[in-house]
Image (cartoon, rainbow, N blue to C red):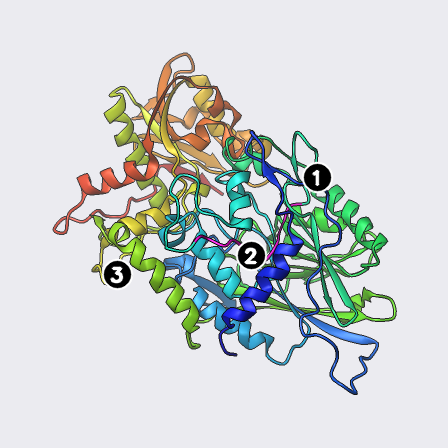
Amino acid sequence: MPATSPAHHQRRRRRTNRLLATAAGLVAAGALAAASLPGAASAGENGGSAPRGHHPGRYQDVQLLSFNDLHGNLEPPAGSSGRVTELQHDGTTKTVDAGGVEYLATHLREAREGNRYSITAAGGDMVGASPLLSGLFHDEPTVEALNELELDVTSVGNHEFDEGAAELGRLQNGGCHPTEGCYTDEEFEGADFPYLAANVLDEKTGKPVLEPYWVWKKQGVKVGFIGVTLEGTPDIVSAEGVKGLSFKDEVETINKYAKVLQRQGVKSVVALIHEGGFPASTAYNYDCDSPGAGDGISGPIADIAKNLTPQVDALVTGHTHNAYVCTIPDPAGKPRMVTSAASFGRLYTDTTLTYDRATGDIARTAVRSANHVVTRDVPKAPDMTALIDRWNTLAAPIGNRPIGYISGDINRDGTESPLGDLIADAQLAYGRTLDAETDLALMNPGGIRAPLTYAAKAGEGDGVVTYAEAFTVQPFANTVNLQDFTGAQLIQILKEQVSGPNEAAPKILQLSDGLTYTLDLTKTGADRVVTDSIRLNGSVIDPGATYRVATNSFLAGGGDGFPTLGQGTDDLVGEDDLTALEQYLTANSSAGAPLAPPKADRITVVQ
């Protein structure tokens, strides 16, 4: 399929701009104040009237292409982040290299061929935690790429709020960055597609900060989309990013707007939900309907799916970066498709929704869906190559600078990861430049976005770590913060990894050198952290003593379900965490003496 013409994009932009609440203004809290609650914002007819002599039949197959959690990965992701696991017929598995928008564009365009009724939707986190190529420019390159991919609609995700609602509004509506200005001679035009944020409300007005829903129409076929992010977004985004916003229950919100769409005559509804599940296998083509419908998936999305109104016909999900295609029965007992396409553009989902023109609804028994790998054995889309080259030219002077050397891959996988230990060690070393009495450092695993790979990525040489590669690992620009905690608080922090909000899905903090303990997974709740095993430099933690702890600013605010980390005293704020990593790599490695991957032996796991 040929690249989309500029004239087509102008038509798409005019159409989209009519749909959006472009009159929304910025409020002091940083949220968008919607001018009014939108009506049924609708796509154009996407092809005009039916060909002469053509009479549509009762049933019409509608193609729904979807993906989620792109996170600005325009170039093929490195290491394990750029591979998927594929289940073979004999029960074995193999890994397949995947991802990169040059290939994603080709796959999507080929998938659309011959499908006159085709919609492309996404499940949130299109931007945020992005590699330097996108993140350095506040994700304008990714929005431009999504426009070229002809994305029709997406929900917001938690990472869309990393820089606050005002910045999300700029990505939607366009305009130069408020402090850095324009990066090129042309003003950034914003997204050609609507971001949906049905459950994200301005605290002052009580209205959604962006459109809550959108309707696609073509020759009498109408499909509504409702977009939400997880209600727990404030727990995993910096406080500044969600200032002035409230996040409502996913099920209640979707059920509310499904009724609104029904009243407007839209009976076919797809929910775009930035919340996900945990399949029993990491293989993207695993059958999670074995032995029964939805038996192979657990987690928040399973409960959401079981409680959403039967008026919703399919769920496109995300957030957990897992791959699955499941049928989870709705409250009426009817099968309903629930999909997720992993992350970083490595997969896309192709779902066929069979639309009944007589009822205006989806014939659920005819729905088919499958995940497909974005393989790298297809031609690159020339327009995406040009886009990447254009932004790389701007980023190269900053991104190509070497900052360190490694002797092998430093991965982020596992309960305790070599890269997690490296980052914690870097923050401890940096903390001691601020305060020599700093005792230890803790790092949240979710803040580590990619591995450090030994193989050269862009001609810099094997083992060379560039600034761009380090930026991809830690893209959030969190500061390194020092705080004082009692030994009792430190013990409680470690127990919060596996209790409270983190009991169902533990978040195991990465530890700096010298801090050790035993994690006993045969136990439950907080008891999984064995208290008398916690030691610092070989000594048992004294509950009454004071310990100086380095963390990033996200954890220092109690993020990721660690409320005790928000109770530290004698705060001292340093530079950003990427600076700490850069300084550590520069000081502890050279071309002749590269840094070896840490052993990841600070936590003893009992299973």
In this picture, residue 547 sits left or right of residue 294: left
- Give the distance between the C-alpha atoms of the residues marked 3 and 2, in whole angstroms: 28 Å
- Give the distance between the C-alpha atoms of the residues marked 3 and 1, in whole angstroms: 45 Å
Residue 523 picture quarter: top right
Q: For the residue marked with disc 1, what is the amino acid?
A: Asp
| Residue 45 or residue 309, whichever sits in front | 45
Task: Bin the neighbour count of mark 1 within 10 Å (Cα to Cα): few under 14, some 14-19, many 20 and up.
Answer: some
Q: Give the x, y percent position of residue 2.
A: 50, 78
| Residue 449 or residue 323, whichever sits in front | 449
Task: Bin the neighbour count of mark 2 within 10 Å (Cα to Cα): few under 14, some 14-19, many 20 and up.
Answer: many
In this picture, residue 97 sits left or right of residue 193: left
Q: Residue furthest right?
A: 358
Of the two numbered discs 3 and 2 on the same chain, state the one appearing first in sequence. 2
Over which residues does the magenta segment extend?
A: 187-197
- The residue sitting at 26% across, 31% down in the picture is 429
Quickly name the residue at label 1: 249
Quickly name the residue at label 2: 68
Q: Give the x, y percent position of residue 232.
A: 61, 37
* SS of the residue under disc 3: loop
Q: Which mark is residue 456?
A: 3
- The residue sitting at 72% across, 47% down in the picture is 38
* SS of the residue under disc 2: loop
Magenta stretch contains residue 189: yes
